[in-house]
Amino acid sequence: MRALKRILPKSLFGRWLMLLVTPLVLLQIVAASVFYQGHWDTVTRRLALGLAGDIALLIDARQLIPDAVMQDRLRFLAARHMQVTTRFSPGERLAGEVPNVRFYSILDNMLAQAVAEKMPNLGFDIDTRRGDSQIEIRIQLPDGVLYVQTLEKRLFSTTSYVFIMWMVGTSVILLGVAVLFLRNQIRPIRQLAEAADAFGKGRDVPGFRPAGATEVRRASAAFIAMKKRIGRQIAQRTEMLAGVSHDLRTPLTRMKLQLEMLPAEAGANDLKRDIAEMEKMIAGYLAFARGQDGESAVPTDLPGLLDDVAADMRRHGGDVTLRPMAPTELPIRPTAFRRCVVNLVENALRHAAKVEISLTRQPGSVEIAIDDNGLGIPPERREEVFRPFHRLDPSRNPSTGGVGLGLTIARDVVRAHGGDILLLTSPLGGLRALLRLPT
């Protein structure tokens, strides 16, 4: 079964085409076999017997009419009405074994059987491959050899070719119509798959609408409904968290005003720092929850975007270098993706002195690598840093890092584009953040 599965077509179009072609080919084989056994074989045998009977008649007439003038007249009539020409070579003997038949086709076999049946006591030699559409039969008579020539069409029925041409021609026409029909039926399924793939990569599919058979239309309508539900859920989540953020900021603002009115004491300063950290956490959480909602994917020059990020980081004092990149354009959400790259570069600069950015094209994907020369992260703890509000620094000191949402937001953005982020060991000795985006 596994070997059969490897042979079978993988696409739906290929399998449907196989289901059409296989019965059609089997039908052609059965029809040709029935035609050959029931018609072509019988007709050809009768034609061969008719030719052999004409030759036997000429031989018997030659023996019954010894007059030379009458024999010439008989040969003339045979050539005129039977399309058979004869020539007698007195005293000649056929060389080799007789009967001697050069078998090239089924016609040779049938003609040999017919001659042996009509003239059982005479040796003969048959040559059906003279190259001039002629058949030559040499018959050993007691006093010499009779040469008989006739046209190949006396042994061949054109109905066989006509039947095969009609059978193959109609099959090809029907197969062509079936292929066109299959393509029209497969196209809506392919469009649905492309729309689902584009939606999974965070790209808009504004022109998609249900088409095709009823089942395909139902699947397309279900996809559109699912897409709308996901959009509503994201919008509701963003609005809810925006409201929660606003509601939390109001009491925090009042607390800050009250603390400003208190005397400058150590306790008040600690509370101010706590409130500032809470505001920073709320802002980061809101950014994480908002994600890239509301932004459409547009074709973007990735090397240009990465160059802008690197230049911005260098203006703030970071040692960021950009390796040479080939021109690459990809449909992405530029603002969200820029935020993702900035988070990764800032995270790398926070723990390392040098950062390198590179872009490579792979079959079916684009890879962006952000390498640093820091201490890196142990392999067993690399997945932890993607958890919201999780930091490897146990002190939770804001001066040594953010609130623990940078890598979470970065992965959320990349996965919304249909890709993913991997943390690996960098060639510089630190950590490599590898962004893999599908093309």
Image (tube, rainbow, N blue to C red):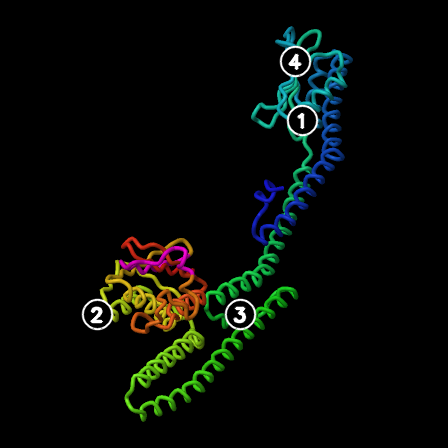
Q: Quadrant of residue 12?
A: bottom right
Q: CA distance from mark 2 to mark 4?
A: 114 Å
Q: CA distance from mark 2 to mark 1?
A: 92 Å
Question: Would residue 223 appear left or right of 421 to someone viewing this image?
Answer: right
Q: Amino acid at mark 1?
A: Ile
Is residue 108 shown in magenta? no
Q: CA distance from mark 1 to mark 4?
A: 28 Å
Seen in the picture, residue 395 relative to 93 is either above or below; the reply is below
Q: Residues within 10 Å of mark 3 (few under 14, many from 20)?
A: some
Q: Residues within 10 Å of mark 4 (few under 14, many from 20)?
A: some
Can residue 166 be seen? Answer: no
Q: Residues within 10 Å of mark 2 (few under 14, many from 20)?
A: few
Q: Which residue is mark 3?
A: 208
Seen in the picture, residue 230 relative to 154 is either above or below; the reply is below
First in residue order: circle 2 vs circle 1: 1
- The residue lying furthest to the front in this view is 266
**The residue stretch that appears in magenta:** 365-383
Q: Amino acid at mark 3?
A: Phe
Percent of width and height locating residue 256: 35, 88
Q: Which residue is mark 1?
A: 106
**Disc ID at residue 317:** 2
